[in-house]
Amino acid sequence: MSNSLVLVINSGSSSLKFALIDTVTGEATLSGLGECFNLPEAVVSWKVNGEKQEFKLNGLDGHHQQAIDRIVALVDELGMKDNIVTIGHRVVHGGTKFNSTVHVDEQVMADIEALSDLAPLHNPAHVLGMRAAAKAFPTLSQFAVFDTAFHQTMPEKAYTYAISKEVCQQYNIRRYGAHGTSHYYVTREAAKRINKPVEASSFISVHLGNGASVCVVKNGESIDTSMGFTPLAGLMMGTRCGDIDPSILEYLLKKGWTPERLHKELVSNSGFLGVSGLTSDCRGIIEAMEAGNHDAKLAFEVFCYRAAKYIASYMVALDELDGIIFTGGIGENSLPVRCEIMRLLKIFGYREDVAGNEAARFGAEGIISQENTPLVMVIPTNEEFVIAQQSLALLNAEA
């Protein structure tokens, strides 16, 4: 048993993902999910030896604490509790306040809560998870790893919105990005695959999932990314609209829409779900498209077209490009999406290796471009490993 296990927690408003990460191998020795918080059907589930187990939570509140208490009991039952050296938390939005991993204390939690306007569904829930973990593991240090931190290296021309400087400064309006931990991980893994130092490599990282973003990474640093002030911007996603003409928002408000209705429409009723009218799940979209559904086909085409446009536009930010990387649930598994995006990039010389594309699925990485054409790779992301590594590194630095 490793003596360097880190409990990684991703606490959401109605869910809590957890994983016990071996910081040497990156493997999750245990992982699970708490879901349906604040509802009668709230549960925590996990797998042990391939067998799924479940624990029902009580009442209609306090589920974050109950879930973490059950995790504590579980790791104790499995003989892992004494091997946990620290706890790492995923935090979606750190604003300009946080550009690196930090030790969690009362001030940090207050600062994360103060940024809740930028991630209203996420940041308050992160703090709930931190407080619950502190109560359950009172002797362990906790660390916060921010999705936005990796993008703090973007130049002004990339993060500045073309509105008045006074408004930007007063309200801290700028491009912040997200999925930074994922983009950080896969670009470093990609550099290893091509035997180049990450500090001398350039990649376009394409994280496609229910949330989706593209990031251009030059010499190991993020220099532009598709998500913006919030994770709503950029690509079309499962239920999020991505880029949209702001005049549409003004138009709907003038038609009597409330800000609350507008927000729900853009965040929860758009994307795959909105265009198809069927589902937010890419697998369901492709299944319906192959069965002849026009709206599903349109949703697929809009998704792939926007992703290809962002990839192409980000080439202008680079002097050279070592490769494109697909990652995330869709990026790692959807052959039709990867195939279509590469087809749309044919003017740049990209050609799909059909056999390679078919092989790089379900946790398998690989090259999916033909030999002697520009490089395209699939690399499964491992955000939990990054959170564990950075938490352990800061713990050791403080020792």
Image (cartoon, rainbow, N blue to C red):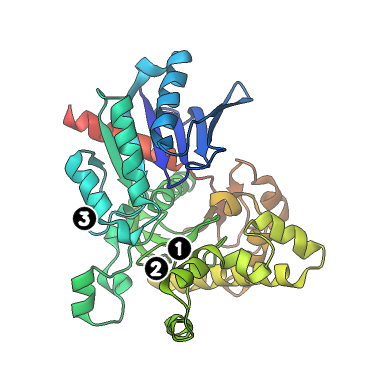
Q: Say few, some or many: other residues with alpha carbon within 10 Å of mark 2 (under 14 / 14 to 19 / 20 or more).
A: some
Residue placed under numbered mark 2 in the picture = 318
* Residue 22 shows in the view: no
Q: Nearer the N terminus, badge 3 or badge 2?
A: 3
Q: How much space separates mark 3 and mark 2, taking CA atoms?
A: 28 Å
The quarter of the picture where the N terminus appears is top left
Relative to 361, 154 lies left or right = left
Q: Position of residue 171 (x, y in %)?
A: 23, 70
- Cβ atoms at labels 1 and 2 below 8 Å apart: yes
Of badges 3 and 1, nearer the viewer stands 3
- Cβ atoms at labels 3 and 2 below 8 Å apart: no
Q: Nearer the viewer, residue 200 or 294?
A: 294
The kind of secondary structure element at disc 3 is loop
Residue placed under numbered mark 1 in the picture = 321
Residue placed under numbered mark 3 in the picture = 97
Amino acid type at mark 3? Lys
Amino acid type at mark 2? Leu
The quarter of the picture where the C terminus appears is top left
